[in-house]
Structure formats: C-alpha cells, structure tokens
Image (cartoon, rainbow, N blue to C red):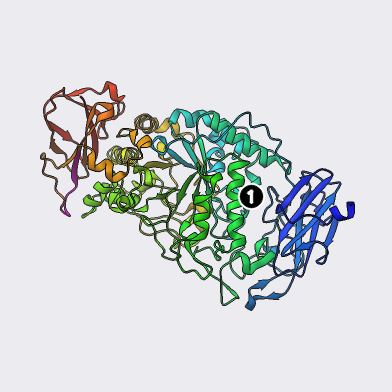
Amino acid sequence: MNALREIGLSAPLGATALEGGVNFSLYSRSAAGVELLLFDDRDDPAPSRVIALDPGVNRTYHYWHKFVPHIGPGQIYAYRVAGPHDPARGLRFDAEKVLLDPYGKAVVVPINYDRAAAARPGGNAATAMKSVVPHDDGYDWEGDIPLCHPASQTIIYEMHVRGFTQHPNSGLSDDKRGTYAGVIEKIPYLQAMGVTAVELLPVFQFDPLEAPVGKTNYWGYAPIAFFAPHAQYSSDRSPLGPLDEFRDMVKALHRADIEVILDVVFNHTSEGNERGPTQCFRGIDNSVYYMLERGEWYANYTGCGNTLNANQPIVRRMILDSLKYWVREMHVDGFRFDLASILARDPHGVPLPNPPVLWDIESDPELAGTKLFAEAWDAAGLYQVGSFVGDAWREWNGRFRDDVRDFFRGQPGSIRHFADRLVGSPEIYGHKGREMEQSINFVTCHDGFTLNDLVSYNGKHNEANGEGNRDGANDNRSWNCGWEGPTDDPQIERLRNQQVKNFLTTTMLSLGVPMITMGDEVRRTQQGNNNAYCQDNEISWFDWSLVEKHADVLRFFSMLCKRRSLRSDNHIVNRVSLVDLLRNVDESWHGVRLNEPDWGDDSHALALHALLPADNLYFHFILNAYWEPLEFELPQMPAGPWRRWIDTSLESPHDIVPRDQSPPHEGYVYPAGARSMAVLVSFV
C-alpha cells in the first residue's frame, strides 16, 4: 500500500501537503524524464536529494507525479526535465537547468541568484529560484471576505507595493520599508485620502534581473510564477513568509474597507526570447506554454520577447486556476489584466471572436463577484477599447486619457471627444447596453508621465534608463506650462497646480470608475521619466515629504473622493445602462452663452447643466481650457442661487469646499479663470 501511495496522484497539480508527506504533480507532454529536486536551504549549491520519476510508474497521461513521505510545508523543491532540444520543433529541453513548478505557491530566491546562468550551458542549482511546498489552509482570516464594493462607489489607487514605502522618509523601520507589512503601516493614509481600492502593480513572483545591465525590473512585469507572491516584498524572509504577510496585508486593507486588485500579467513571462533563460515553462514544455513562429522563434505580441499561449487548454486551465487561487486562498477582490487583448488571440496570433480563456474567466462561478479590468490592447496593434468581449469586463479607457489631456493642453479639435468622455464615453460604450461604469477613467498610470510631470514636461527625459532616451512613448500629450521641468516661478507653479486639479476633478467626476496613480495626489515627480520600469530608486518611490509640500492638492483630492458621484446610485439596483441614463437625465450643453455650445475645432470652452433627482440637486460644469478668463452665462434657478462647490482657479481652501457648505454666487454670470474648471450646485 505504501509503495502504491508513493506513486503519487496526477491531481492536484503542484505540491500538496498531505498526511505523512507531499504529493507532487507536473504537466509535461514532451518530456522524456523528470527529476524532483529537494533542497534544505535556498542557498544550497546542490539538492540534498534527487528523485527520478519513472515514466512507467510515475506518469499518467502527460502528468508526472510522485508522493514523497516525511516532508511537509516549507520544503524547498524544483525540477529538472529531460527531453529533446530541437528548437525547429519548438522543443527546448535542458536536463541541467533547475526549474520552478508552474503551480508553485511560494518561491525562494538565493542570495546569489543569477539570471544569466539560466541562459548559459551547464547546471545552475546554486543560483536558480526554487519553489516551496505551501502549508495547508490554516491561515486565520478572522472572518474576512472580499468586499464587493459596487463600481459606482469605487475609487482606484494604482500603487506599487515596494515604491509606496521604500523611500527613506517613509517613517518605517528598515525591515518594513518596501514590503507588504509596510503597506499595512500606511493604511491610515489611504483611508484619510478616501480611495476604496488599491490596484497593485504585479505581485506575482517576477525576475528582478529582467532589465538592462545594472538596472532592476522595478515594475514587475516579468512574471515567472503565477501562484506565488513576490518574495522580495515580504519582510518575513522565511520560505513561506510571503504567503502569510500578503494575506495579512489583504486582511488589514479589508478591515479598512479597501479592496485589493492585482495587476496580472498572463501575456508573457520573464524567460524572454530564444536567447533568454530557462527558468520554468521553456524547460517544461516550451511548445505548450508559448506561441511560436516556425517552431524556433517566439511570437512577440507583447514587446517583451515571448507571448504566453493563453488559449492552449493547459495554459487556459493554469490561468483560471491561478485567478481562482488568488480569490479563494488570498482573498483578493479583482484583477487588472495587462495587455488583455493578447488573451483574445489563438495559438497562431489570430484574434478570436469568442476567445475561450476570456469566456472561461467571465463564466466561472467562483469569479462571478470579482472585478475584472482589461487593458484592452496589446503591443502588436490589436486595440479593443469599446469592443472587448463579454459582459463582466470593464476597460481601461485609453481614449479618456488622451482626450482629457488634449482638452486641457488646448489642443484644437478636442472638445467633442472631451464632452463624450465626461459623460461616460457613450460613443465608445453606448452600443453595448452596459452600465455607466464600463469605463475605467484615468489620465495617468504607471506607464507614462506622472500627473505632475504631465504639466511640467513637454518631452520625455529617460536618460537614466541607459537607452539614449529612445525608450518610452513619444506621444505624451503633455504641456509644461511654459518651462521645461522644475521651476521657482510662482506663476508657472500656480498654473501647474491648477492644471493638476483640473485633471483630478475631471477624472473623479466623469461617469465611469476613476483611477489615479500613486503620488499624483501630492504631485509626485519622476523627473520627466515616462518609462521608469527599471528605476528602483527615488525616481519611482513615493516621496513622503510631498504630503506636506502639496497638502493643498491632497486636500483637494480627498474632498473629491467624498463626493465623486454626479448621479443617483439607483442604477445599481435597476441595472440602468449608460445610454438609458443619459437619455432620461435632464441635461444640456452650453458655451459661454446659454444653449450655444461651440463644437468647433477652435473651441476651448464648454458647460454642462444637469439635474440629479435623487440628490435634489442641479449642477453646472464650467470648463475653460482657453488661455484667458471667460464669463459664462448661468441658467436662472427657481429654488435658490447657484453655489460654488469647486473652482480650480482659486487658492486653497476656496478651490473646493464641502458641497453642503458651498457659498452662494450672486447673479447669472460666472467669471471662469483661464485654464480652469468650476462646478456650481443649486439645491432643488
């Protein structure tokens, strides 16, 4: 009976602690042999035990499996997989390379980790990442469950786990800086700001050395283990420490009523192109896990060297299993899918009308209450904003970003598109019959200028990346307000502050789900770097001195968070679509004169008037992107005077006030400052 048990089981995949030992299971269709390696320590130069799996005994179909007695949670392990090295047929086995388990729930990284060793001939046991046997589900969640905030009440804060607290002025101890535990320490700041969700840049274990020589992959868009939290973000350095510290962070954020959304990268891995390292998938079953061109070459729809074969059945199952694991065992609330349009391609790269993996995700009952956000494009030109498949997905609205930037920099021909973005982008989403929160509205994200740099630089300044300023986008749609970079000129600084508030107001009050990027609320700068993916330093970290320096902007944003919704929430219950809402709401467009909106290419001024019945409130948006002050006519209100809630041209604390304390405005003309935005209210 014991001998039969030690054959192992094909399910579940990965390493599973059972009574008396651990069951290991690995999928490889084309392997000729598999070795299971056990290590006593992450820095051991060689395994303490090598267990060869007998293909006649320890293999069922394409699953290699083995039960190993007398070991348990915390055991460090890896694989070596033998088979043909025939790139022309898509096979790249290397029996000397140490490989991670694709289903590994935790990863250890040796102190002398060497990415290059995984690309050179020869063994690399001493310098390779390894997997760790997880403990059973014994974590005490203390009743925690995902929060399931409605989209209408969601305010997303895109945040980098390490960058949020790594700066020396964060006030945290050295062991907490840059960690999941460090995020816990800063939750009071998030609460005071008023955001309802943090969207964490990638926290799947990634390869920090997948970067130019001498640089670090800071952002984390180089995954190598889709089930394991990034070990270097844990202050607990024990093999299983990252698992529980990540859970501690999620539990603490939930207690503060803040959701956790993960930025997930299921489009490529850190193994790169044909010259890249063999770390996991390449050495286990290359032709299964990756899209290939003519066998030897990797399809590159990601711009990162390879493309995950997401609609291959084994890979589809892995993606779905990963998502369900993070929801079930790690309690996350949602996912933002990086370059999500790649998941719509078949194994040959052809876009599919009904991509299996996307429908798997959408229709899975365990994910039914999970937030799903798509970056609905890829690096090879497939752009699906407004046409992404399914009913559950919300989309990063890249056109919102571009059109709002254009309007406030005074770009001719931008006013019609800007008006559409303000009311939920019906020209993009109206045909879907979807709710008004289909659009994720953002002006900045991790990729590109920060909000401060958007109003401080006309061009990118990426020299620190070491690529001669060739990397990063050239189309930034930015305006420096008259001077490139930092300045002591009070007039320019005042204008920049005003422009920042214009962008924040538009993002927060437009129909859709608002998202801002870490530090934009205090004008964090990256010194003009619009591609800081390899800058793990003060260029990228949150500078906590800015909280005091730009307290007026932080106050402004926090008050917007308190009143971000400009319409009734009845649509949540009644499932009112964006089109129906706009059809039934009492709204009208104006210019500087009532009922005379100027939709011409040279127009830079607009006003929107609408009634919010549930709030017994009229509001009047005044948007002046012109370089001179303008006077806007106001409609006469029978119930009382107009009251000034927001005016970005005014200094703090008059730029925004509590809405119920808005001071009355006398008369029916409002003087709007140059390049400003005002919101007036009148109570019914």
Tell me residue 210's x, y (percent). Answer: 59, 58
Q: Is residue 441 visible?
A: no
In the displayed structure image, the side of residue 32 where residue 533 appears, left or right: left
Measured as percent of width and height from the top left, residue 155 is found at 42, 37
Determine the residue positioned at 41% across, 50% down: 395
Where is residue 35 shown, x and y percent of the image? 80, 62
Q: Is residue 171 above or below residue 595?
A: above
What residue is shown at x 35% (from left), y 32% (from top)?
A: 560
Residue 181 in percent (x, y) is at: 61, 35
Residue at 38% x, 32% y is: 561
In the rendered image, which quarter is residue 24 located in? Answer: bottom right
Left or right of 348, for residue 579: left
Q: Nearer the viewer, residue 503 or 136?
A: 136
- SS of the residue at dot 1? strand
Q: Residues within 10 Å of mark 1 (few under 14, many from 20)?
A: many
Q: Which residues are magenta?
A: 600-608
Viewer-nearest residue: 542 or 586 = 586
Quarter placement of the C terminus: top left
Query: Which residue is denoted by mark 1 in the rendering?
Result: 227
Residue 657 seen: yes
Q: Is residue 605 magenta?
A: yes
What amino acid type is highlighted by mark number 1? Phe
Is residue 210 found inside the magenta-colored segment of the image?
no
Depicted 32 relative to depicted 657: above or below: below
Residue at the (77%, 66%) spot, across then down: 96
